[in-house]
Image (spheres, grey):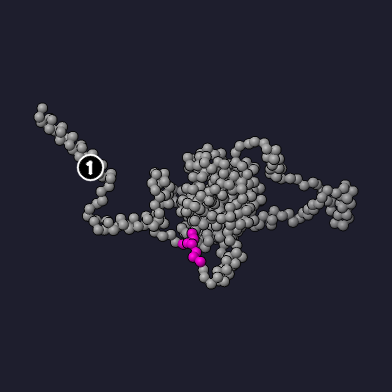
Amino acid sequence: MAGTKLPVVQTAGLCKTFKDFWRRPRIAAVKDLNMEIHAGEVFGLLGPNGSGKTTTIKMLLGLLYPTHGRISLFGKPPTDVSVKSRIGFLPEESYLYRFLTARETLDFFGRLFRLPQKIRVERTARLLDMVGLSHEADRPVGEFSKGMARRIGLAQALINDPEFLILDEPTSGLDPIGARQIKDVIRRLGQKGKTILLSSHVLSDVEDVCDNVTILYGGQEQAVGSIDDLLCQQDVTQMTMPTVSDETIREVKDLILRLENKNADVTHPRHKLEDFFLQIVSQAQSADVKTSGARAGGEVPDFLKTATATEMVDLVGSLVAAGSAPEVPVTAMAPPKTKDLVDPVRGVLDELLGKEPVEADEAEEASASTETDISVASSKPPVSADSNVIDALLQGEHKKSDDTTSSESNP
């Protein structure tokens, strides 16, 4: 239908069956999964171990191919290169280079996305502040605890400002303070327009942050819907009010019994253990009790905000009113040029080897120059410094051999 916005993620009849050595079906990990995740939605993928959550995520990332069915991300298959830069992924285990510092780690992943140095430096500083690790920016990540590594993992998943964020057990290994901070970050990212897929075994985390959930069991969808619709008990009515006298409570209960012929149960509401724990910690922090480890995180950086439909309409209106459109930078959706397909880690290796970084235009000119030289003098191979050294060594060995032969013939 014209004007209908496509879901960010859409699966239809998705199936994945693992086979044994003889190509016989062995395990049906995912069976006939139909799922839609819309822009700006925080979506929960739930299920016990072996229910197909990780297999589904791997198929969304293009790491596994479905046996049957269809997957689309932004209206394209997950194997399309153009959608890769629009996705951020935090795996269940944070795989980081242990000898790089936190700052170098984020800079490294920024280079993989070919971000300019100025943007890398700015985003690294703001993301480290967001996850509460600014004071540990120059410490090797191999010395981090699991909780601190998870924080860096979340920061690296956001370095490219993704439109779609996949989080697999984001609060694993975190203390209650860190878990609460990560959940607050997820909420704020959702408010800023990010689309998030959250897979977690901590059901309270999913209940706190997700808009809609799908519950899997045996690779099949067992329940789907919004958190409010799935958890609301329609056959129970609850009223809350400030504390009243016992006489008032008795009169209200008698009134309900007389009018509805039902007994009312009056109790005091309870705090969530998480809220009570954080209240105690906050009191300790106010008393200036010294501690080590990660600190409270900062605000979500502005660059992670996704433009809303209203903002886009306002932008188009301002461009039309101005009478001319400014030059728009090439986005991640633009097809990559040939020179952009160079190994993305070349710049990192050059920096580690002490070489000066080569700009893209200079590299292209050098490549063109090399091609011209080869075409003109293709019959004469270029002589490198290494070949000169080897020739000198061979000549020395040859001379030594001649001297030996001469001495043997003339004792």
From the image, which quarter does the N terminus lie in?
A: bottom right
Q: Residue lying furthest left in this view? A: 410
| Amino acid at pointer 1 | Asp
**Residue at the image position 49 percent from the left and 59 percent from the top:** 332
**Residue at the image position 63 percent from the left and 56 percent from the top:** 191
Residue 379, position as x, y percentages in the image: 22, 55
Looking at the magenta stretch, what is its main secondary structure?
loop
Residue 133, position as x, y percentages in the image: 57, 43
From the image, which quarter does the C terminus lie in?
A: top left
Query: Can I make out residue 107 in this image?
Result: yes
Count of numbered badges drawn on the protein: 1
- Whether residue 372 is in magenta: the answer is no
Residue 150 vs 212, above or below: the answer is above
**Residue at the image position 44 percent from the left and 51 percent from the top:** 23
Query: In this picture, which residue range is highlighted in magenta?
Result: 326-334
Q: According to the image, label 1 marks what residue?
A: 391
Residue 386, position as x, y percentages in the image: 28, 44
Residue 348 vs 317, above or below: the answer is above
**Residue at the image position 68 percent from the left and 38 percent from the top:** 288
Query: Can I make out residue 52 in this image?
Result: no
- Whether residue 329 is in magenta: the answer is yes
Nearest the camera: 356 or 388?
356
Does residue 201 appear to the left or right of 89 in the view shown? right
Does residue 255 appear to the left or right of 160 in the view shown? right
Nearest the camera: 36 or 22?
36
Label 1, secondary structure: give it: helix
